Amino acid sequence: MEDQKKYFKGTIPPPVIFFAFVMFSYLARRIMPVDLIFSTQTVRLLVGLPILLMSGIIAAAASMIMIKNRTAINYYKPTTKFLLTGPFRFTRNPLYLSFLLAILAMAVISNSLWHLISCVIMFFVFNFGIVAREERYLTKCFGDEYIRYKQKVRRWI
């Protein structure tokens, strides 16, 4: 447990990061709207809703598997095992991927460049600020088993 605190000290929980970026992009759009290329609402919905649906499916599947396997969803609780089923077969970070897809869908649906910019910045925050720490922690906890998993399954998609 002490090791986990060392690895995650000073980090902001990913859901808080997600909501902060959503709020930033919403406020930025209200102050200075900058549109993307989609002109009609029908096109935006036809493109954005499937992305949003995929985000929800990935998040629900990953959460259910984590609950079923009794491993922590909460960022500050110790990881008891890493998972190899469901969306974890395709990405090591399905919950973070679902956050990224959700804000990407918001960018398309709202036709907002600010949401797209937030998505890109959030990717870098997750990739270098959160995931890199998690991977060091999981490597320390699970050793060669986790290293083999990293070689088989991509970090994102």
Image (cartoon, grey):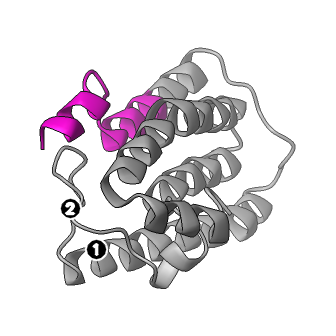
Determine which of the numbered discs, if any, sits on residue 34 in the image: none
**CB of mark 2 within 8 Å of CB of mark 1?**
yes
Report the side of 77 relative to 87 (left or right). Answer: left
Query: Closest to the observer: 117 or 43?
Result: 117
The residue carrying pointer 1 sits among few (fewer than 14), some (14 to 19) or many (20 or more) residues within 10 Å by Cα, namely some
Name above or below for residue 104 compared with residue 36.
below
What's the magenta bit mostly, secondary-structure-wise? Answer: helix
Task: Provide the residue designation for mark 2.
Answer: 72
Report the side of 34 relative to 16 (left or right). Answer: right
Q: Residue furthest top?
A: 31
State the quadrant of the N terminus.
top left
Q: Secondary structure at mark 1?
A: helix
Residue at left 39%, top 29%? 20
User: Which quadrant of the figure has residue 49?
Assistant: bottom right
Query: Closest to the observer: 132 or 126?
Result: 132
Residue at left 20%, top 53%? 74
- Per the rendered image, the range of residues in magenta is 1-23
Task: Provide the residue designation for mark 1.
Answer: 66
Name above or below for residue 6 compared with residue 97.
above
The residue carrying pointer 2 sits among few (fewer than 14), some (14 to 19) or many (20 or more) residues within 10 Å by Cα, namely some
Q: Position of residue 21 (x, y in %)?
A: 47, 31
Lower sequence index among marks 2 and 1 = 1
Q: Position of residue 71 (x, y in %)?
A: 21, 68
Q: Secondary structure at mark 2?
A: loop
User: In the rendered structure, does residue 3 fall within the stretch colored magenta?
Assistant: yes
What amino acid type is highlighted by mark number 2? Ala
